[in-house]
Amino acid sequence: MKAVSLFIPCIVDQWLPSIGMAAADLLRRIGCRPYFRRQQTCCGQVLYNSGHTNAARKLARRFIVIFEADELIVSPSASCVHMVKSHYPVLFADDPFWRRRAESLGARVFELSEFMVDHMGATDVGARFEGFVAFHESCSHLRGLGLSDQPKALLDGVSGLTRVSMEGPDICCGFGGRFSVDYPEISTAMAADKAERFAVSGADVLILGEPGCLLQIGGYVNRHYPGRRVVHLAAFLAENAEGFRRSPGRKEGVG
Amino acid sequence: MKVRTSQYRQIAAREMADAHTRRFLRLLPVRLAQRRQAAFADYVNPAAAIRSGAAIRAKSLENLPSLLETFEQNALASGAKVFWARDADQANRYIIDTAKENGVSVVAKGKSMISEEAGLNEALSEAGIETWETDLGEFITQLLERPPFHIVGPAINIPVERISDIFLEKGVIDSPESDPVRLGLSARRFLRNRFRRAGMGITGVNMAVAETGTLINVENEGNIRFCKSAPRIQVSVMSLEKVVKTTREALELLRLLCRSSTGQLMSAYVSMDCGPKKEGETDGPEQLHIVILDNGRSRIYKDPVTRNALQCIRCGACLNACPVYGQIGGYPYGWAYSGPMGQVVSPLLLGLSATRDLFKSCTLCGTCRDICPAGVDHPKLMLHYRSRDVAADPLLHGSGSSLFEKTMVAAYVKAASHPVLWEAAGRGLRSALNLRAKDGVIKGAPGVFKNWFQSRDLPEGPSRSFRSLWDDDPEGQGDDHAR
């Protein structure tokens, strides 16, 4: 059994824990043994994206020390993985000691669907769902890590599921972290376009792999298209898999 | 051109409320993006073509000082005059002096971003020289005194009725006209008369070839070729990063430029000119002046990170691809350069403190970088600007962050450095926000969250975090591998 270190995004840890539990559940289903390093908190992405480079560097060093000994590190967020893989080396561009450590670590960090499909060859987790599903291609998945086939392969592995096409699946949903509150009108207009494309796609559920997009699109859809669901891929697969048991500590709500 | 980059928010709000702009933005960027894609399908390997373009631009910049010297030598040898302008004022003064020395009172201009950047039209007007933009779109924006809406179509968003009104007001037509083709013909007739009187033509430069001293322009209306060949004196204004080494490289970039900007395999007109009219030739200007404008680019060039912004070839493909541009259009960017192109170029030329919204109003989605035929990494540059702004970089005129922001960041780092504090802070935040939850949904909250709830809900925070659930999970326990 492959031991896999869970890299849980801060937003998942503190606000969307069911996604983290789902990721652990899926990893077990495909024959891995997930474990969680309790020292982990935040990779520093939110600081880095808003220009607080020194602060981000502190959290990056901390992250490297915590995860450095792990062989396989898996996260249910492409933007967090992208931060570690692509931005840590930039943060330490002038610091060879930490840059080498960052690059070595980055090579062992994987996004969940990437790990499941490319490394474990798993596309069928025993999930069943009768319905129409659309897929949103998150920026960090598609353009950050170059992932698109992997999450779709996992969806196509769900029996009974019909994947429908949605216009502009690769257009940004307008979250962008701080952008969503710094430029609320523009961010909202982008979310509205995305939600409308989902609404006319004929899909019952919109699936995506990024917690940030989930808050943005899910939050907008919940207010303006009540009854429609936006769900993280990991949660969707786990919830619809055979023998799924819901984790305690979460009431049903958006997403 | 007046700099309005600090009014980004106001202009964006105005544009988003404008039904005409919105309707238009649903059409143009989409259509141009489709055309671009179709034109790129003509390549055997589109991705390789883009990589090759990026490599040419990177290599050209690497050798920029020597390429510029070679270009100057060859341009001089062909009979052109070369003027190196440190800033916009120097460039404008040289052009005005040249006009005055030669008794020029009317100037015909081809569309040129660098002259917008330099504020050349205003300078010429102040000097009492009549200046006419001869690109149809640019002519309309000149009459309306508006910045370009889109680099490829500066006035493409202006309704026909508005064009008819302004043409009437300025004497281009005598009676209202609703047929766009007739409006275009009227402008053509009007401008043809200006061309006859123009003693000087001023154009920009798409590419300059070092090994031959050639100036290349692409266009679809023929007005640039007219500007370059009819008037007695020709002035070509180029920013100093426009030079490439060989004609072969220039042609490769031209193919990418035309596909990227208008989705054409090649634009209707391509002008390649070396020097003024030679003895025995019938066409061409008697004098050719090449103004090479620095305007802060040497400084940008010295920093290997910001140098990347100089790779831009001004095709405008990033505008059509940008989801933010698609909501607000070109005006909010407040200067000659709009969209992601403006977001990476303007902060370097105008300073970070005057352009904060340009590098902050971006989700870092990366579509611009993926589509760029010249290898510009827009997200990386915008992250760099954000970082230099927080650091109050004196060279780039960064303004630093507020005391509130500094305190918040310090608190965040502190909490994130101690898992117990982190968990406590998370629990505190959940409890506070959950007070407002109803049926599992939070629909509003004050303070830093207020803007979120303008249009979006938030699921009620869970009673327990992931780490706390994990401790209780029979399969999760004891799995820490802690050293």
Image (cartoon, coloured by chain):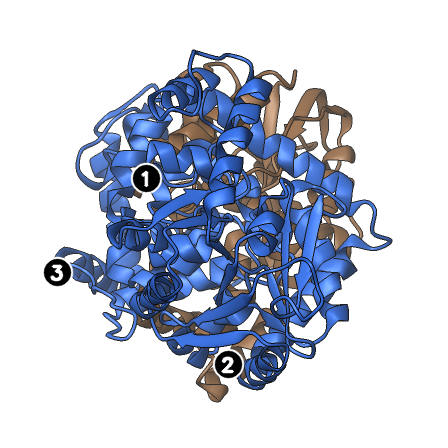
Chain colours: A brown, B blue
Q: Distance between the residues labelled 1 and 3?
A: 21 Å
> Quarter of the image holding residue B60?
bottom right
Q: Residue A183 carries which label?
A: 1
**Which sits in the foreground, A219 or B375?**
B375
Q: In this view, does B9 lie to the left or right of B31?
A: left
| Spot occupied by residue A70 in the image (x, y as percentages of width and height) | 58, 72
Q: Which amino acid does label 1 sit on?
A: Tyr
Q: Is residue B158 left or right of residue B255?
A: left
Q: Which of marks 1 and 3 is in front?
A: 1
**Cβ–Cβ below 8 Å for labels 1 and 3?**
no
**Which sits in the foreground, B24 or B376?**
B24
- In this view, which residue lies farthest toward the right? B44
Judge whether A162 appears above or below B82 on screen.
Answer: above
Identify which residue is drawn at 50% across, 58% down: B378
Identify which residue is drawn at 46% across, 53% down: B199
- In this view, which residue lies farthest toward the front? B280
Is residue A249 shown to the viewer in this render? Answer: no
Q: Mark 3 points at which residue?
A: B403
The answer to which of marks 1 and 2 sits earlier in the sequence is 2
| Spot occupied by residue B97 in the image (x, y as percentages of width and height) | 33, 66
Q: What residue type is labelled 3?
A: Leu
**Cβ–Cβ below 8 Å for labels 1 and 2?**
no
Q: Name the residue under label 2.
A: A99
Q: Which of marks 1 and 2 is in front?
A: 1
